[in-house]
Amino acid sequence: MIGEKIRRWTRTYAAEHGWILNPDSRALDIVIRGLTRNCKKFGHPYCPCRLRSGDPEKDRDIVCPCIFHEDEVRDEGNCHCRLFFRPDKDE
Ligand code: SF4
């Protein structure tokens, strides 16, 4: 199932970067559901928190993990969708 595959990938990817997933499991589920929905509908796990332009070339930037997430996690403590978190972020 795509949703489970995405969930597993998020765990592995976060661990590889020394991050954690959103500790709020309800919020986490919403993002994972959004990624899954986009994957089924558009063939790629587009960011559920950003607008697609409809141009696949431009929208490549917002396929999860988007081009912004590393800077966001470093500077703000989490990515825009609040999927990936720096473990030391104060909530
Ligand atoms: S903001 Fe987070 S969830 Fe959205 S595409 Fe970027 S890394 Fe993925």
Image (cartoon, grey):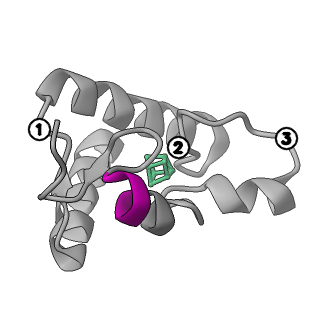
Where disc 3 sits, the SS reads loop
Q: Earlier in the sequence, mark 3 or mark 1?
A: 1
Q: Earlier in the sequence, mark 3 or mark 2?
A: 2
Where disc 2 sits, the SS reads helix
The span shown in magenta is 73-77
Image spot of residue 69 (x, y percent): 47, 60
Q: Amino acid at mark 1?
A: Pro
Q: Residues within 10 Å of mark 1 (few under 14, many from 20)?
A: few
Residue sitting at x 59%, y 66%: 67
Q: Which mark is residue 39?
A: 2
Q: Nearer the viewer, residue 89 or 15?
A: 89
> Which one is closest to the eye, mark 2 or mark 1?
1
Residue sitting at x 59%, y 56%: 63
Q: Amino acid at mark 3?
A: Gly
From what the image shows, is residue 79 above or below residue 91? below
- Locate residue 18: give its quadrant: bottom left
Left or right of 72: which side holds 25?
left
Whole-number angstrom distance, CA of label 2 to CA of label 1: 23 Å
Query: Ligand 1 near label 3 (Cβ, under 8 Å)?
Result: no
Q: What is the magenta segment's predominant secondary structure?
A: helix
| Mark 1, residue position | 23
